[in-house]
Image (tube, rainbow, N blue to C red):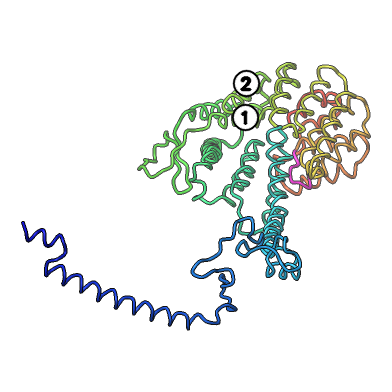
Amino acid sequence: MDENKEKLAGTSPDAEDIKDEMEELAKVFKEELDKAKKEAEKETSGLENLEIDGYNPQTVSRGKRNTISEDELCEYCGEKRRGTDKDPDGPYCSECEAMLEKYPYDYRGVIGVIVASCIAIASIFLFAINVPLFATMKQGDKAVADGHLYTAINKYNSAVEYADNINSQNRCYNLHKKMAIVCFDMVNMNSALAEISDNIPDSVLNLLTFKDLNVILDASERMQATAMIAQQYIATYKDVTEETYDKIIADLDALSGKTIYIKDNEYHDETEKNFTPDGTETKVIADEGWLCMYKYAAAQQMNKDPEIIAGYLEDVANSSEYMKTLVASLLATTYAGLLEDYDSAEELAEFVKEKNADSPEYHMIMSVIYRHRDKDYAKANQICDEGLKMLAGLPNGESYVMQYGYMLQIQQTLSYIMQDEYDKAYETITTAYDNLSMTGGLSIQVRDLYALLALKTGDKKTFEALELEIDSYGDESIAFTSDVTDYQAGKLTLKEIAESGRYDLI
């Protein structure tokens, strides 16, 4: 107990030793501190006028930096105190004010404006390049939506030209897809297939967004296979006669619903005894509409009753939308010219107009109706004039007049004949003949009307030239029809020929 008391009182030998040791340490520490202060004062002498980037000793007191409030900072650099000798209350420090007097614009803003301007100019340049392409394509899309297919295909062709001018490597697959679909809707299968085969590779066709083109490819393959098989059967008969007609119809009926095998570019139907499929063939079902087209052709060649002819055409139209579009005008003129079923003809006229408002088929059908039903030849000619003006007003209109104007010019020719205006009739049919000769679409009916009116108007030179042309081919299948020979023999008049309906079926 006593020992503890001594320690607490600080009088123990141990406490004395600790006290002496602590005093010695304090003495040494003080000596070292004084020495450090003297050395520091020597090293910092003369720093009053020294400036270091971001630090000014004049603004710093001994051991402590003066605090600058945010309101006192330079508005430009945000680091130094605002105010100069000339303007103590100014918003800038002296360094920034000197720089701004020399360069009055914010260089950071200038650079930003330059960059933004470059981007804008580049954007405008690219926009200017691509606007014609996309704008023209959109015009084509709108034309399709409005049912103006000739206009649409013209716009799409223009868009392709723009694309080629921008970049020949830019294939614009979607644009060619649109063109293929429009060609298909115009029942121009060859052009639709060309668009696909020439411009859209198989790798793209396999994409989901291009699968709808398979409808075109499948339809084409089915129709071609059916045509090849049908022709193989028909080829066994030298000609369509009263004796062969029923056999031909029976052979075509037998193909209905049958499978056709395609292998190595050869076509075999399932009834063929000498062919055994091995599973490597492509299989399609015979196209019913195409079979009926061959039946119609046989019935037409044999001058069968109009009801039979119309019946086969109705079967064609009922087989698919594509085939209905293909034969609509033919069926309509059959209704009007041979069956006097004008209501059905008008329904089909509206159908073809809805499918393609640019097509002259609507005007042609209505002209036939006005001529047969109403005996209004002036009105029949008037609607043909409207159709021709419509064609001429389309983009690339002159070409459309040459390609399709003939069907209206034929109707005008027939109406002029019924009005005894033979010179106008001859002039009109001459235009149709010349245009079709240039486009490669000349038909025997147009040629015969041309020959009949050459005879009627006394143009023997033209008629003899046609005779020589026929003789040069040496092919009886393209000889003048009985209409020409009967007219020459006085068995038929031109009006009887015009009213026969045979020249409406074009």
Pointer 1 and pointer 2: residues touching (CB < 8 Å)? no
Does 181 appear above or below 9?
Answer: above
Residue segment shown in magenta: 436-443
What residue sits 25% from the left and 73% below the top? 23
* Residue 158 horizontal/vertical position (percent): 72, 49
Q: Nearer the viewer, residue 125 or 295?
A: 125
* Residue 442 horizontal/vertical position (percent): 76, 42
Which residue is situated farthest in the left direction here? 1
Count of residue discs = 2
What residue sits 73% from the left and 35% below the top? 148
The image quadrant where one finds the N terminus is: bottom left
Does 40 appear above or below 54?
Answer: below
* Residue 401 horizontal/vertical position (percent): 81, 40
Query: Which labelled disc corresponds to residue 298?
Result: 1
Q: Which residue position holds label 2?
A: 311
Residue type pointed to by label 1: Ala
- In the rendered image, residue 448 lying in the magenta stretch gets the answer no
Q: Quadrant of residue 330?
A: top right
